[in-house]
Image (spheres, grey):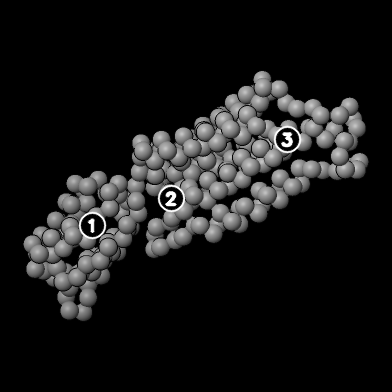
Amino acid sequence: MTSLTVTIELECFLRILMASLCGCMIGYERTRRLKEAGVRTHCVVACGAALMMVVSKYGFSDIIQNGVYLYGSDGVDASRIAAQVVTGVGFLGAGVIFRTGTSVKGLTTAAGIWATSAVGLAFGAGLYLIGWLTTIFIVAIQFLMHRLNIGADAYTSQDISLQFHDCPQVREQLFAMLEERGALISGCSTKRLDNGDMSYHLCIHIRRPIQAVELQAMMDSYPQITAFSV
């Protein structure tokens, strides 16, 4: 049986690295627009897609030798199995994505599942070096980007609702707190209630979510606040 040389596998891994870099660039652009899928998600998806392409292209070279099919019959296409895995695991990954209000959770987890299936294909096809190198690379992506808080992955989506008697000081205190914490407001809706109270609903992106105890302290300081939720 024929197999890929170490030089060819290293070249293939270079392709995976370049694809991942491009994924980071695309993810950064999305991050600038405050989209949920940021640098890390796009990087993992690009990495997995590149690995699947390598597996599809080179992973079945050992079934043909000198134009002769060693396994199966003439016209067999072993790469069909890889194609079905790509599609099937895509549905599996969709099962871990949840949406709550404006917050979307599980995108990077789904991308990781999808990329992990590509690692399994690589080992199953006998591409051991690529499988190990890509595994280490994916783990490094997840660990380092999570620790370094790069791009949209550094932010958490949060919904804040506040009801208070119409009072400029309360509004100023609320927005001052958000500015101090470096929060980015992605959506805001206000409503004047029948009793004259103001109702604020804010959708924000923030590195460290605002805790209920902080709003409770604000409520204690301003009797005009009648209700809040986070």
**Disc 1 versus disc 3: nearer the observer:** 3
Q: Secondary structure at mark 2?
A: loop
* Residue drawn at point x = 57 percent, y = 30 percent: 133
Q: Gap in Å between the C-alphas at discs 1 and 3?
A: 51 Å
Which residue carries the number 1 mark?
211
Q: Gap in Å between the C-alphas at discs 1 and 2?
A: 21 Å
Q: Is residue 65 above or below residue 196?
A: above
Which residue carries the number 3 mark?
59
Amino acid at dot 2:
Glu
Total marks placed: 3
Quarter of the image for the C terminus: give it. bottom left
Which residue carries the number 2 mark?
36
Q: Secondary structure at mark 1?
A: loop
Out of 9 and 218, give the one closest to the viewer. Answer: 9
**Disc 2 versus disc 3: nearer the observer:** 3
Residue 58 coordinates in the image, percent (x, y) = 73, 32
* Residue drawn at point x = 59 percent, y = 56 percent: 92
Residue 110 coordinates in the image, percent (x, y) = 52, 51
Graded by Cα atoms within 10 Å as few (under 14), some (14 to 19) or many (20 or more), the crowding at tag 2 reads many
Tell me the quarter of the picture where residue 159 sits: bottom left
Residue 191 coordinates in the image, percent (x, y) = 25, 70
Amino acid at dot 3:
Gly
Disc number for residue 87: none
